Image (cartoon, rainbow, N blue to C red):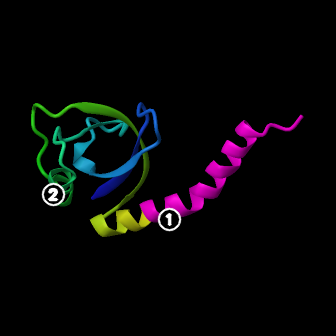
Amino acid sequence: MFSIVEFVDDPSPSCDVIPTAWFVDDTETVCYWPPYRSSAAINKCVKNQAEVMSDWPIFNVRKMGAAGNFHVTLIYIAFIAVYALPMIMRILAQLIFPEV
């Protein structure tokens, strides 16, 4: 099983896919993340649902969805991005050009 998470402490909004087993506990608000710099190494860990290692850091997250298949979660992320973009643009426009 895979989950889509938003890293809540990240200064810019970012979402990613993690194996559900990477959640620290049942609250699903904190997860482990591999310490690698290479996207290829991280993707390999995610796709293969690598076992959490003791040196992996933990991050605060907000669970946005879940699916049993890695590729389905990627479709969900694309869906979120497409439908969230107009909302984000409206919010930015309101911040930049507030009504007087």
Amino acid type of disc 2? Lys
Quarter of the rendering occupied by the C terminus:
top right
Quarter of the rendering occupied by the N terminus:
bottom left
Q: Is residue 91 visible?
A: yes
Q: Label 1's element?
A: helix
Spatial CA distance of label 1 from label 2 is 23 Å
- Residues at circles 1 and 2 in contact by the CB criterion of under 8 Å: no
**Numbered disc total:** 2
**In this figure, which residue is indicated by the disc labeled 1?**
79
Across and down, in percent, residue 84 comes to: 58, 55
Across and down, in percent, residue 87 comes to: 65, 52
The residue stretch that appears in magenta: 77-100
Across and down, in percent, residue 21 comes to: 22, 47
**Prevalent SS, magenta region:** helix
Quadrant housing residue 96: top right
Quadrant housing residue 72: bottom left
Q: Is residue 89 within the magenta segment?
A: yes
Quadrant housing residue 36: top left
Across and down, in percent, residue 28 comes to: 35, 40
**In the displayed structure image, the side of residue 91 where residue 14 appears, left or right:** left
Q: Label 2's element?
A: helix
Q: Residues within 10 Å of mark 1 (few under 14, many from 20)?
A: few
**In this figure, which residue is indicated by the disc labeled 2?**
44
Residue at horizontal 51%, vertical 58%?
Answer: 81
The image's mark for residue 41 is none
* Most foreground residue, 6 or 1: 6
* Most foreground residue, 84 or 40: 40
Q: Is residue 81 within the magenta segment?
A: yes
Amino acid type of disc 1? Phe
* Most foreground residue, 69 or 10: 10
The earlier-in-sequence mark between 1 and 2 is 2
